[in-house]
Amino acid sequence: MRNRRIITGGIAAFALMIGALVSAILLQPGAVELNSGTLLPKPRPIAPFTLSGSDGRPFTNADFSGHWTLVFAGYTFCPDVCPTTLADLASVRSKLGADAGKLQVVFISVDPQRDTPERLDKYVHYFSPDFRAATGDNAALEALGQSLGFVFLKVPGATPESYLMDHSAALMLINPRAELAGYLTPPFKADVIAADLEPLLQRDP
């Protein structure tokens, strides 16, 4: 009973954080709305960060430079939202045709305890050989979450290893100058996202 109250309270706190985040995004004056989400009226700089890439190399702000990027925060043990979203993103790239190479997809794991670089690499490449992944310790992830606007919360399970991670479901859109440019929000429709991205991908880096 006590564990149930803890979990319920944690989920409620998580929901409040999500609500505050969405309100902050959608109520900004002058924001340009996409059919799949919202562009910020002015792109925001991303605080310097360093994560560990699934390729074994450091993943930093520089990895966002020179191309448009969609970032999704989740974890490989996610039972539904993460695999569905990554499948949607693979479909988006296929619908972009020749422009697919101008869009980078990055999966940020919020479960560094279980998501090793090797596991992350295998996981994202199941959806696309071009997807990238990275993770870091909790302090680095929380700092990046504050900068990009995603949140996550560990939900205890029946055993220490069977926990879940509640996390934001939005996609974060990063411009070629490595700035936060907007958010795409569920439910995701690959054709709508591709149509929104096409004119952005035509802009000069």
Image: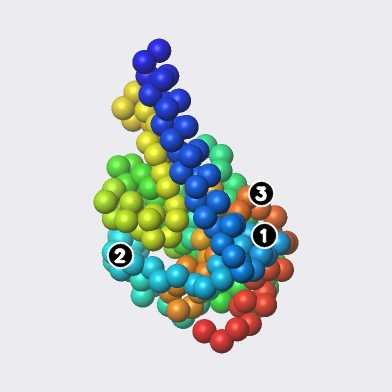
* Position of residue 132 measured from the top left corner of the image (x, y, whole percent): 44, 62
Name the side, left or right, on which 142 lies relative to 20.
Answer: left
Name the side, left or right, on which 77 lies relative to 97.
Answer: left
C-alpha distance separating marks 2 and 1: 28 Å
Crowd tier of the residue under label 1, counting other residues whose Cα lies within 10 Å: few below 14, some 14–19, many 20 or above: many
**Label located before the other in sequence (1 or 3):** 1
C-alpha distance separating marks 2 and 3: 29 Å
Kind of residue indicated by mark 1: Ser
Q: Are marks 2 and 1 in contact (CB under 8 Å)?
A: no
Q: Residue at x 45, y 56 (%)?
A: 149
Element class at badge 3 = loop
Element class at badge 2 = loop
- Whether 144 is drawn above or below 177: the answer is above
> Mark number for residue 49?
2
Residue 15 visible in the snapshot: yes
- Whether 110 is drawn above or below 80: the answer is below
The residue lying toward the viewer, choosing from 28 and 64, is 28
* Position of residue 19 measured from the top left corner of the image (x, y, whole percent): 53, 44
Q: Residue at x 29, y 48 (%)?
A: 138
- Whether 173 is drawn above or below 13: the answer is below
Give the quadrant of residue 55: bottom left
Kind of residue indicated by mark 3: Pro
Residue behind mark 1: 36
> Mark number for residue 187?
3
Element class at badge 1 = loop
Q: Residue at x 36, y 44 (%)?
A: 111
